[in-house]
Amino acid sequence: MGYGMRFARTLRAVGGLAAAGALLFTAAPSASADYIRDGQWALDAFNAQKVWKESSGKNVTVAVIDSGVNGEHVDLKGNVLPGKSFADGGGTADHETGDDHGTAMAALIAGHGHGPRHGDGIMGLAPDAKILPIKRNESMGGDANNIDGPLRYAVDHGAKVINMSFAGPYALTENEKSAISYAVKKDVLLVAGSGNDGTNKPSYPAAAPGVLAVGAVAEGGEVLGESNYGAHIRLIAPGEKIYSAGTSMKYRQATGTSDATAYVSAAAALVRSKFPELTAGQVAHRLTKTAITPEGKTGISSPDPKYGYGVIRPYRALSENIPAGAKNGPLTMPKETETSAGAGADAPGSEAQGGVSDAAGSLSPLAVAGIVLGVVVVLGIVVGVVVATNKRRNGPPAGGTGFGGPGGGAGVPPQHQYGFYQQPGNPGAYPSAPPTRPPGQ
């Protein structure tokens, strides 16, 4: 049994969703007459018809930094803005006739199909979103990312989500890091594919702070074997045998994290459309909080290196009552944004480093009380030592045995292998040393 039946059934069973029936513009046929639409098993798994009753991506622009987009494709026409090409020759990026990768990603995000009731061809997960195509210059720097100019252009031209379905082995340049920080400060959600080497070697831009890294789930429900993994992975999405639009050929089928990334960008567009008040990090928070692992687990507290928080469930992300959460959600933050954006409470391993005043400001009243108590205890010990020293010099007073015995004595807590702090496990206890601030908090 393929993913289109088995995993879709798992998603609905766990998610409490009804079986998928009609597509967006159809009455209620059991199947489309178009084999391309029939082959879009991810839409069935997402229960797209129910998703679109909540949101279809209106008023959200998704930038697709890629190889350019064929905006005249029958399934995309009207949804593609001119954009810009950073490749040799410049110009717009909406008339691509060669490389079909960017067109495929755009269609998975905002394709609207064609024919009677739009029942044929490729339907994107966010069919009312607009695509801002940006062609990066892949001829310069070999496998370099070349995203500095494209990122800034996307931000300055209204993109709320930026899709980057590519991955390279080279770390970002300082200019590219600065461009990511610029996007984060402007509240734009950056989504990138983890790469298709099947290794834990970091690929960029997915592994960069400030980016939502995406892996792929296979037809059988497990993580795709080619999907790169690591501590930076936050979500996975369908990425095997994915039908989409093309250029040299009208349609294509492909496997990889590129397609998964497009589906996550589309899901983000849906959430941004319905909840425009949420920050980019809070949009990511909704997606991670409602994800489901390949084993059927939900609500896990920390991301798994293989699948992050799990497979996206757009309907849940749109319909569940979920607290907004921290500004940056599960995203780690670039260093350049630490003063203006800060590290999200849900972001493990954030690179942002706060000062002493920040640490004190983030402590709870209970923690402050514990610190004060610790100071009092230490002062008591110091006093006890001084008094005991004086007694050794001058002799004990009549009828007294002094302070600091094994039981502690007056004003001195019991002393044991953990020093002067309480045993671990007791309410409000410290370990053998005062607690340190976790990295990035």
Image: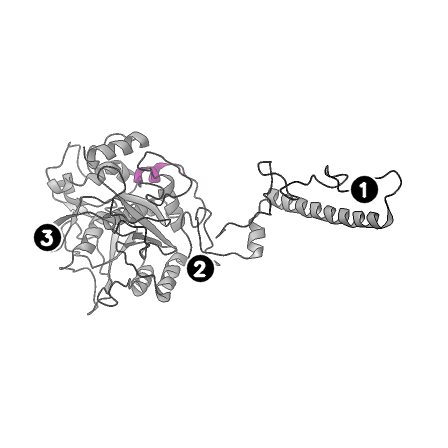
What element does badge 1 sit on?
Answer: loop
Q: Picture coordinates of residue 270 (x, y %)?
A: 30, 45
Q: Quadrant of residue 307?
A: top left
Q: Which residues are magenta?
A: 313-323
What element does badge 2 sit on?
Answer: helix
- Is 215 magenta? The answer is no
Residue at mark 2: 335
Say what amino acid the circle numbered 3 marks: Met
Say what amino acid the circle numbered 2 marks: Lys
Q: CA distance from mark 1 to mark 3?
A: 92 Å
Q: Picture coordinates of residue 157 (x, y %)?
A: 31, 60
Q: Earlier in the sequence, mark 2 or mark 3?
A: 3
- Is 318 magenta? The answer is yes
Q: Which is more foreground, mark 1 or mark 3?
A: 1
- Mark sitting on residue 402: 1
User: Is 300 left, or right, of 139 in this rendering?
Assistant: right
Q: Nearer the viewer, residue 432 or 298?
A: 432
User: Is 314 left, or right, of 378 in this rendering?
Assistant: left
Q: Is residue 345 visible?
A: yes
Q: Picture coordinates of residue 184 (x, y %)?
A: 39, 57
User: Is 236 left, or right, of 322 in this rendering?
Assistant: left
Residue at mark 3: 249
- Placement of the N terminus among the 4 image quadrants: top left
Q: Nearer the viewer, residue 347 or 83?
A: 347
* 428 up-or-down from 349: above or below: above
* 314 up-or-down from 19: above or below: below
Say what amino acid the circle numbered 1 marks: Gly
Q: Nearer the viewer, residue 164 or 300?
A: 300
Which residue does the image show at 40% across and 38% down from the upper left?
300
